Image (cartoon, grey):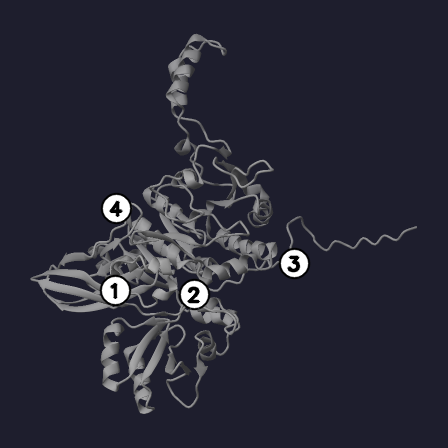
Amino acid sequence: MAKNNTKTNEVDQTGLYWPGKQTGVNRVVLPFQVVETINESKADREKAQRDFFTKQAKDDLWRNKLIWGDNKYVMASLLPEFAGKVNLIYIDPPFATGADFSINIRLGDLEWTKEASMIEEKAYRDTWGRGLDSYLQMMYDRLVLMRELLADNGSIYIHLDWHVGHYVKIIIDEIFGKENFRNEIVWCYTGPSRKIQDFPDKHDLILRYSKGEQRVLNIDAVKIPYSESFLKRRQYTEGTGGIYGGRERPEEVVEEYKKGKVPEDWWSDIPAGGQIPATELLGFPTQKPEKLLDRIIKASSNPGDLVADFFCGSGTTLSVAEKLGRRWIGSDLSKFAIHTTRKRLLDIPECKPFEVLNLGKYQKVKLKENGVSRYIDFILKLYRAEPLSGYTTLHGKKTGRMVHIGDVDSIVTEREIRETVKECASAGVKSVDILGWDFEMGLHDLVDRIGDEYSVKIRLVQIPREALEVRDATREEVKFFDLNYLEIDHKLNGKTLTIALKDFVISNPEYLPDEVREKVKKFTDYIDYWAVDFDYKNDTFHNMWQSFRTRKHPSLETKCFHTYEKPEKYQVLIKVVDIFGNDTNKLINLEV
C-alpha cells in the first residue's frame, strides 16, 4: 500500500499567500513640511500665524493637502491626525507589469517625452522586482493603512485590470472583510485593442468596499438621465396601457423615470483613454476621465467630506473633489505629478486654499532603510568624486574641483559656504562644488560675492531625491542638477511693485534631447511655472500670484504687479519651476 505523503497544511485560514508575505506593516511617522500655501487670503494667512497653536484655528483653517512622497510613509504619517476621518478613498495603482512612467510635456512649441525619474524607476523595481510577490506585498501594506484612515462609514474604490484584479480582491477580502465587499464595477470602453487572435480587452475593474456595515451611497446623485425619446415612449406606454396595462396616473410614473436610471455594476457611458475630452488631457498615459470620478465621489461622499487619493497622478480625483465641494488629500511619488496636479487645481475657478507638503526627516529614514551607514562616502561615490582626508569642510575632489557635502536633513547656509570657501582659500584651492539637499534663501545672489572675496569659484549642486533610492552607489547613476540662474527685474512706483522675468539659465541643458535643445527660442521656454510671495516671512512660501503653462494656455506671462497697503519693509520671494520640475528661488528685499 502506498504511503500517504501529503504534508500537513499549516495555513489556518483561506486567503492569498506568497513567499515572504508580511501582515504586519511598519509605520514610520515623519513630520510634514509645508513647502507652499496656495490661494490663501491675506486675512486667513494672518489668522493662521496668530492662532497657529490653537485647535480652533486648525479646524477653521482647513487646507487641502497635496503631498510629495512615498505613500506608505505619507499614510503612516497621516494616521496620528486622520485615522478614522477619511470618508472616501479612490486609488488607481499601477497594475501592468509594463508600467510606463514617461510623460508627454511641452517645451515652447515642441512636445517631447519626459522619461521616468530614478524615484519612479525604483518604485517600479520595488513593485515588480520580485514579480507578483513584491507587487502584492506593496498593495497589502498600503491597503492596511488605507483601512485605518477610513471613517467607520467610509468606502474605498480600487481601480485594477485583468493583470492583478483577481489577486488583489482576495487581499482586500482579508483586510476589509469579504462581508464588506459591495461591488465589482466593470468599466467598459471602446477603441482599438492590442489583441488580434483573442477577444479584445475592453474593460477595467473597480472594486468597491466599505469599512463596515454603514456606508454612504447617494444613488439619486448618480442616476443616468433617460433620453427624451425613451421618456416619450414610456409616457405613451403607461398612458395607453401598452403591454403592461393602463395606469390611472401615468404622469406620476413618468416623473420617476425623469429622475434617471440607477447605474448597474457595468459602466459603458463614461469614455476612456483617447476618448477623454481634449480639455482634460495632461499627457499622463493612465489618466482617468473626470466623469468617472464625478460618479464615484458623488455616490460615496457628501459635500464637506474628506476624499483621498494616494496614487494621485495627474490629479483627476483631487480636481473633481474640489469642484464638488469635498475636502481632499492627495499624494504621489513623482515630483512632476505633484507639479502637474498643482497647475491643474490652480486652473479651477475659485479653487479653495491648499498646501503642497513634503515629508521631513525623509532622507535620514530612507538612507537607513537602504543600508547607508557612511553618508559622506555614499554621496561622494554617487557624485563620482574621490574622498579626501585632512580637511574640516572639504570631503572630496572631482576633476580638479573640491567637493563639500551638506548634512542630511538640513539646508546649506551662507555660513557653511563661507567656512568651506575659507578653507579652500587656505589650501590654495580655486574651485569647489557645494552639494546640498536644500539651500538657504537668497544664496544664489551671495555666491559670486563670497567667491570673489576669497578668489574661489563656487558651484551649488542639488543632491537629487533620487539618491535616496540608490542602494549601490558604485553601480547606479543619478542626475545631479546645478542650481539654475534666475534674474529678475523689479521696480517700485509708490506702493506698486512690478516684477518681470529678465533671464533664466537652465544649468543642465545636456539632460534634454538634442532635437529639443535646438528648438529652444527664448529663455522662458525652459520655465513651466512661476509664482510670487509678495510678503515672505521666512516661513512657508505663500503663492499670491502665479502664471503657468497648460495645453489650453501654453503661453507664459512674464510680468506681474502688486500694490502694498502700507509702507513697510518687505521680502519678496519668487519661485520658478523648470520643465524638469526643479525649483529655483529668488529673494528680493524692499522698502515701501
How would you rate the neighbour count of disc 2 (Cα within 10 Å): few for under 14, some for 14-19, many for 20 or more? some
Give the image location of residue 60, x and y in percent: 29, 53
| Mark before the other along the chain sequence, 4 or 2 | 2
- Work out how far the residue at label 3 is from the one at label 4, CA to CA, in angstroms: 50 Å
| Mark before the other along the chain sequence, 3 or 1 | 3
- Secondary structure beneath dot 2 equals loop
Reply above or below: 334 against 591. Answer: above
Are circles 1 and 2 on residues that touch, CB within 8 Å?
Answer: no
- Work out how far the residue at label 4 is from the one at label 2, CA to CA, in angstroms: 32 Å
Residue at the spot of label 2: 30
In front: mark 4 or mark 2?
4
Residue 11 visible in this rendered orientation of the protein: yes
Q: Quadrant of residue 413?
A: bottom left
| Mark before the other along the chain sequence, 3 or 4 | 3
| Mark before the other along the chain sequence, 1 or 2 | 2
In front: mark 1 or mark 2?
1
Give the image location of residue 86, x and y in percent: 43, 49
How would you rate the neighbour count of disc 3 (Cα within 10 Å): few for under 14, some for 14-19, many for 20 or more? few
- Secondary structure beneath dot 3 equals loop
Residue 527 visible in this rendered orientation of the protein: no
- Secondary structure beneath dot 1 equals strand
| Mark before the other along the chain sequence, 2 or 3 | 3
The disc placed on residue 350 is: 4
Give the image location of residue 105, x and y in percent: 36, 52
- Work out how far the residue at label 1 is from the one at label 4, CA to CA, in angstroms: 30 Å
Q: Residue at x 55, y 48 (%)?
A: 176
Residue at the spot of label 1: 504
Q: Which amino acid, mark 4?
A: Glu
